[in-house]
Image: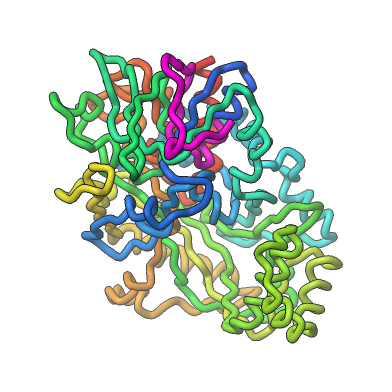
Amino acid sequence: MIHDLLNETPPLGFLADICIVGAGAAGITLAVEFARKGKKILLLEGGGAVREDSSQALYDSEVAGLPHRGIHTGRIRVKGGTTVRWGGQILELDADDFNPRPAVPESGWPFPKTELIPFYERALHLEGLDKVERSDAAVWRDLNQPFTQFADLEAYLSRWCPEPNFARLHNKTLTSHPNIHLWLHASAVELITEGGTTTGLRCRTLTDVETIFHASRYIFALGGIESSRFFLQPRPGGLPWNRSGLLGQHFQDHIDCNAAAVHPHDLASFHDTFDPIITHGFKYLPKLRLPPHLQAQHGTLSIGSTMSFEDTGKARMQAKHTIRNLTRGRFSDVTRGNLTHTARHVPMLFHQVWRYKVQRRAYAPPEVRIFLRIHCEQEPTSRSSITLTNQRDALGLFRVRFDWQISERELDTIRQYVLIAQRSLAGIASIIPDEDLMSGNPNFLARCDDSNHHMGGMRMSPSDSTGVVDTNLRLHGLTNTYICSSAVFPTSGFSNPTHTVLALAVRLCDHLT
């Protein structure tokens, strides 16, 4: 059931079993799982059913370090959270990302990957991927193409959700399940505690409607940056969950950059190796990564890459976007002008449809520019941080001061990876490294993007002296409050974080039931 705090008030005396704060991927997953287990759920979303400028303005932040696009574009306050614009790429962390690496200070998780493996599998069902092919080799066999491997680089496939918007994916459950009470425009502003227990959560709208929600347990499923921000807000008596002093520290994103130009020797063969695969209703993306033993040998962080096909033909891109909306049944997003424009590009679309329907691959025009697109882990002890300014937002909360840094070790990891790729891919393409990267010219930093993968700041650790949440995601200092967010990641690897967050969500649900 869906309610709106702008025009409704919760019934007096309503006590939920679980109050979940944030209706993004993690919050919706938790609500669906708990509801199916018979728990009475409050799901609180600070935004509305659609994106609103007034709600987005609450995320306006001060950027103190390197430019970081995701501090504003990668945070969406709306039902569905960032999944409303997420591509839907699913990827597990590697086993070695969970293990301490002697050459990488503070690396590893408090438990091995084997702890999450069954929950990764269950997360696939909640992502609409229960029928996806798990074996990379089987995908290539189905295409009747070889599963190409390269010396020193491991080839693999990521998976993509057919419906990445979790508000759409789980709409029926959210709107009709009697155990779920979803409240829109209910922004959390104050955690009410007594001793070491949370007794209520004060929420407020931008129109100054205020109420206190009550539950037996509270789970904050906020974004990686907003998680730190909320728990950094000052309180009388201090912050009992920050005895470690690590709250907001060691923020990690994935460094995303074009590190080299790629010139294939045989264009058709190259595209057959690296073009996205679309088969049996699922998308798979060929990728490369540096194996753990070579990370250790070269002293690098975790790193991988994709081939980036940059089509400068904007008209073609607009036509492709229209076709995508039509094939996904999003007819309301297509105008008559879109259809007229698309009709002018029928020859290109014929090649695209043939490639898509017959060869089951994405289509890239021959003239596209190709780059080696890097995805690099940041150090677990990253100097990046989330703190607060002295400026308040419209709800009265202090805004974020965000400082994103890229270390020399991270840049050196990218350089070494490019050189390894240059050797490993020599049989299929010429790899021309970016001159500024290789020379150490600081101009390269301006071309390093973030990945909208906001991790760290609320480190998971068994001890409150070395972290902010324990191994079951319970907030240190409180008995009934939990954090289910990428903010708890001690080590980020280079993989997209959402799948791991959802595995943690399913694990937490089992722990609390």
Position of residue 117 relative to residue 129, above or below, is above
Taking the spot 39% from the left edge, 25% from the top edge, the residue there is 482
Q: Position of residue 31 (x, y in %)?
A: 55, 29
Q: Is residue 476 visible?
A: yes
Decide which of 248, 190 is in the foreground and name it: 190
Decide which of 166, 491 is in the foreground and name it: 166
Q: Position of residue 190 (x, y in %)?
A: 28, 31
Decide which of 231, 280 is in the foreground and name it: 231
Position of residue 259 relative to residue 401, above or below, is below
Taking the image as shown, residue 189 lies to the left or right of residue 388, namely right
| Picture colour scheme | rainbow
Position of residue 181 relative to residue 187, above or below, is above
Q: Is residue 361 magenta?
A: no
Residue interval drawn in magenta: 1-30
Taking the spot 74% from the left edge, 65% from the top edge, the residue there is 326
Position of the C terminus by quadrant: top right
Q: Position of residue 313 (x, y in %)?
A: 61, 84
Decide which of 202, 307 is in the foreground and name it: 202
Q: Is residue 9 magenta?
A: yes
Q: Is residue 103 visible?
A: no
Which of the 4 image quarters holds residue 283? bottom right
Q: How many marks?
A: 0
Q: Position of residue 282 (x, y in %)?
A: 74, 52
Taking the image as shown, residue 372 lies to the left or right of residue 253, namely right
Position of the N terminus by quadrant: top right
Taking the spot 22% from the left edge, 52% from the top edge, the residue there is 401
